[in-house]
Image: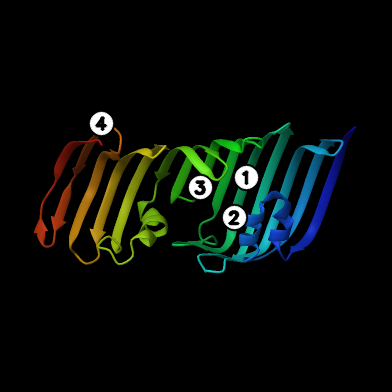
Amino acid sequence: GQWQAKVTGKNIALNSLVKFIGPSVNEKQMEMLSQWNINAVMDVDAELNGHQTRLASAKVSGKLREVMFADPTGSYAGEALAAQIQLELQIENDRWSWQQTLTIDKGQTYFEPIFLDLDQQSVKLSSEGQFNYANKTWQINDVEFAQSTSILANGQLNGEATQLTHLQMDLSSTDVAQLYKDWLQPFIPGSSLSHLQTSGELTASLQWQAEHYQIQMNLQSVTIVDDAGRFAIDNLEGKLGWTNQATVIPIDLRWSSASILSLPLGGSTLQAEASQ
């Protein structure tokens, strides 16, 4: 028969989230996760509906605090995190559909090489999608990631098991300085681009499928100054892109002034095309 249940839990100490999610992962994944150090305290409210022994739908609201995690290699870590999560799940035969929102607004986290101080800039991740349990295919119709003014990304993804098969993503930033500090600089330590002063705004789009990609970017009032004085460019505007396909992508850039070492170059424009 049909059944309904309401579940409420307060101050649940999750000394091991690995045990909590154990039934939903395979043996290899479980072995890997068991090596992590994970702790949290959770409040949760859930409404469950089902038929006989099968779950048909769930609506979950939860708050996590005092969250910490670390992997054995130190590549991933979080400390003193606090988060709120909303999840709605529908299950029909082998098809699972979900909507979720996760907001993290306290603590610090490190995903090599990215470090985020969430006390200063909170992040929000929301998604809506489907998973076919029978053939292990999945699609995320709408995913959005936001970090203050640093970055806003939304897109669609498709995959099978752990393999991504299609990606389309749009990104924007109204603070290129913060974007560079949080998401670009960590990937280029020690290079000639690792110590820059930046400002401006940008938007970008990315398409990827079966090893084919296309990236396009629009720049607005972007300024880049090398701390060592090797180069600078001011008020860079326009569009550029690159691809490994036969598609031709126009490049149209202009700037009000630039310099290389102590040589001023003034303003100029650049028009070109990019393709495979």
Which residue has dot 4 on it? 248
Residue 262: x %, y % from top left: 11, 62
The quarter of the picture where residue 89 lies is top right
In this view, the residue in front, 133 or 261, is 133
Amino acid beneath label 2 = Ile
Sequence-first tag of 2 and 3: 2
Which residue has dot 1 on it? 101
Label 4 vs label 1, nearer the camera: 4
- In the picture, measured across the screen, residue 156 lies left or right of residue 248, that is right
Sequence-first tag of 4 and 1: 1
Residue 269: x %, y % from top left: 15, 40
Labels 2 and 1 touching (C-beta < 8 A): no
Labels 4 and 3 touching (C-beta < 8 A): no
Please say if 175 is above or below 254: below
Amino acid beneath label 3 = Ala
Q: Secondary structure at mark 3?
A: strand
Residue 276: x %, y % from top left: 25, 36
Cα–Cα gap, marks 1 and 3: 11 Å
Which residue has dot 2 on it? 104
Which residue has dot 3 on it? 146
In this view, the residue in front, 98 or 235, is 98
- In the picture, measured across the screen, residue 204 lies left or right of residue 18, that is left
- In the picture, measured across the screen, residue 124 lies left or right of residue 195, that is right
